[in-house]
Amino acid sequence: MSTMIGVLGGMGPLATVDFVEKIIRQTPAEKDQDHLPLLVHSVPQIPDRTAYLLDNQASPLKALSHGVRTLANAGVGCIAIPCNTAHYWHPDLVEISPVPVLHIAKACSDRLVQQSVRSVGLMATDGTLKANFYAQQLEQRGIALTLPDESLQRQIMAGIYQVKAGNLAEGGALLDKCVDAFLAHGLERVILGCTEIPLALEHIDSSNLAVGVDATDALAEACLHWYQQAQTPH
Amino acid sequence: MSTMIGVLGGMGPLATVDFVEKIIRQTPAEKDQDHLPLLVHSVPQIPDRTAYLLDNQASPLKALSHGVRTLANAGVGCIAIPCNTAHYWHPDLVEISPVPVLHIAKACSDRLVQQSVRSVGLMATDGTLKANFYAQQLEQRGIALTLPDESLQRQIMAGIYQVKAGNLAEGGALLDKCVDAFLAHGLERVILGCTEIPLALEHIDSSNLAVGVDATDALAEACLHWYQQAQTPH
């Protein structure tokens, strides 16, 4: 069985780099050879996920499926997708993938259970909110979820697209205020449920990172667990 | 013709991330879709390059060739290798690759010509020094090269292996002193000719980055040029 992990990335490219770096930093390693074998498909020429979900524009499913097939044909043993919104198509990709496809909201919700968190807010794209998979994963675990109101959600989206345009400082400042707005509701934690968010908050060295739950980091941890299990002889 | 760029990485994994980030930062982009399509083979289970070249240990050529074939079979249009030492096998990989394989020392030397540099020092692994390709590329361009003496080279190697072990602060401090030692010889610039070196100096925010010539960054620029030419209709 292959222990190489496929990363279906490019959504966006910097978030993919952030994800790979989070795998590396969580890996106990003393030399190159101790690190996880990865094949990273970072092909950003994929129709915008949120634009499809909200404005009925071109679907990214064909491009996502092509990425899964490229990774599977190249011999990966499982696939991770460092883009929350793309998980709208997770059921479709599981259908065509010959190898397991990890789920970012499952990884993130598992981490919340480990930390005994009972109430969270969710910062994510309009597309992820519409897809509703975070609500499902959290409900299964009995964790109360608060969604942003329309005005706050507009600010979150503005921040995310600033990051995608390379404006990390501006995007980070906007997103940081959004975390504050959530905390004003008395929530314990806030899920950073779009891969652009943690990298922007890290860029501005935000103190809100301590109350944020980094979905990218949780998926990186799930990769490490998968790799350790795949290496264990049966 | 495919415009996807294959990255033969994992040597080390953090240096591969640094390389991809340098491609992203040099790309004029306003949205995800403007970025370069990449397939990154970051499989660090490759025998140590320098250990083979100096101590006659296992050769990495088989693993490198496997990586090239994996990338080519997945449909990349060219390949870049963000590891200087691995370029010892560049002629062998060119031989088996159906697509062009860029050369990091060529990219770096081209940058020195653009900057009208006439004299440089070289910080690299023992293996890269033995392989001698920097000396060849620089001689062709009439740039004078100064190599470190034995004692300085030992310090450079110690710094590089600290970085590979994840000790970026310690490695960075060691490597920073090595740049100082080179500059004491009156050289204009120092080639950061091992991919671990620029990332360590960036980690400690070294002022020596201004006199260093970042080979990783030069290779990233060569990728961008290749992509822009590949997109131009003939």
Image (tube, coloured by chain):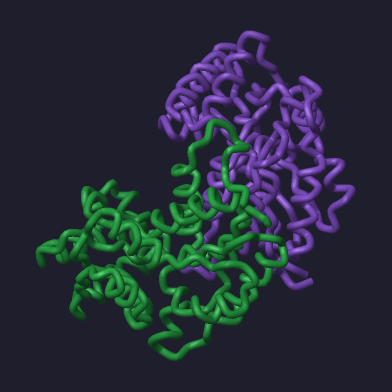
Chain colours: A green, B purple
Tally of numbered discs:
0
Asked which quadrant contains residue B233, the reply is: bottom right
Q: Nearer the viewer, residue B101 or B57?
A: B57
Tell me the residue at 39%/56% (across/down): A218
Tell me the residue at 59%/23% (across/down): B188
The quarter in which the N terminus of chain A is drawn is bottom right
Tell me the residue at 37%/59% (across/down): A167
Asked which quadrant contains residue B16, the reply is: top right
Tell me the residue at 21%/65% (across/down): A120
Residue B26 percent coordinates (x, y): 54, 53
Q: Is residue A210 visible?
A: yes
Residue B135 percent coordinates (x, y): 77, 26
Most extreme residue toward the front is A234
Asked which quadrant contains residue B191, the reply is: top right
Against A96, residue B216 (above or below) is: above
- In the rendered view, does A6 fall on the left or right side of B46? left
Q: Which of A72 and B72 is in front in this view?
A: A72
Against A219, residue B166 (above or below) is: above
